[in-house]
Image (cartoon, rainbow, N blue to C red):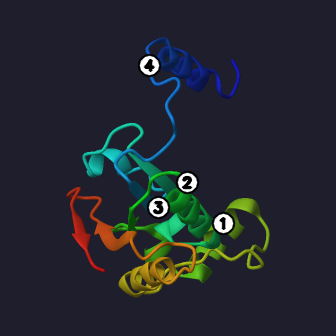
Amino acid sequence: MGDFDDLLKANRDYADTFDQGGFDGKAHAGVAIVTCMDSRIDPLRMLGLHYGDAKIFRNPGGRVTEAALEALVLGAHLLNVDRILVIPHTRCAMASSTEAEIHDKIGAAVGQDVTWHPFHVIADQKAALAEDVRKVTSHPLIPDSVKVGGFIYDVDTGLLSQEV
């Protein structure tokens, strides 16, 4: 059995009932979401959205990186995005560990020094969220007409709280 056989089988089952072919790829609800890669987050369902409603960019900590900004600019100009939500979450490993702790854990797992690799931990999640919203609202290629909000998702209740 191959390493991915279970997933390929699940994909074939999915494709048997797939009826979204020919979709235009735009964000039909006009929404873009920047959030964490954490598997406890279901970006569409938590906002009452469906397939094709939103563009979703995920990374550790849900930070607005250069790659996230690139996606947001493209979304705003080419993919119907007029609202952007930046959504980190509670109990995030990136906000509850120090850079040294993450280096130690990964270094122990791989048996070598990994301090050369930054992991961009978040010392103050609310301050980082405010900074990320500012990055988006001040970006010269994101129109002022695009609404931007900063939220924190609670992984234990499923609720969002608007912080910015």
Q: Upstream in the sequence, badge 4 or badge 2?
A: 4
Local packing at callout 3 (Cα closer than 10 Å; few below 14, some 14-19, many 20+) is many
Vertical comparison of 48 with 12: above or below = below
* Marking on residue 78: 2
* Relative image position of residue 70 (x, y in whole percent): 62, 65
Q: What amino acid type is highlighted by mark number 4?
A: Asp
Vertical comparison of 123 with 48: above or below = below
Q: Upstream in the sequence, badge 1 or badge 3?
A: 3
Q: Nearer the viewer, mark 4 or mark 2?
A: 2
C-alpha distance separating marks 1 and 3: 19 Å
Q: Secondary structure at mark 2?
A: helix
Q: What amino acid type is highlighted by mark number 1?
A: Ile
* Marking on residue 36: 3
Read off the residue under disc 4.
Answer: 19
- Nearer the observer, 59 or 112: 59
Q: Secondary structure at mark 3?
A: strand
C-alpha distance separating marks 2 and 3: 24 Å
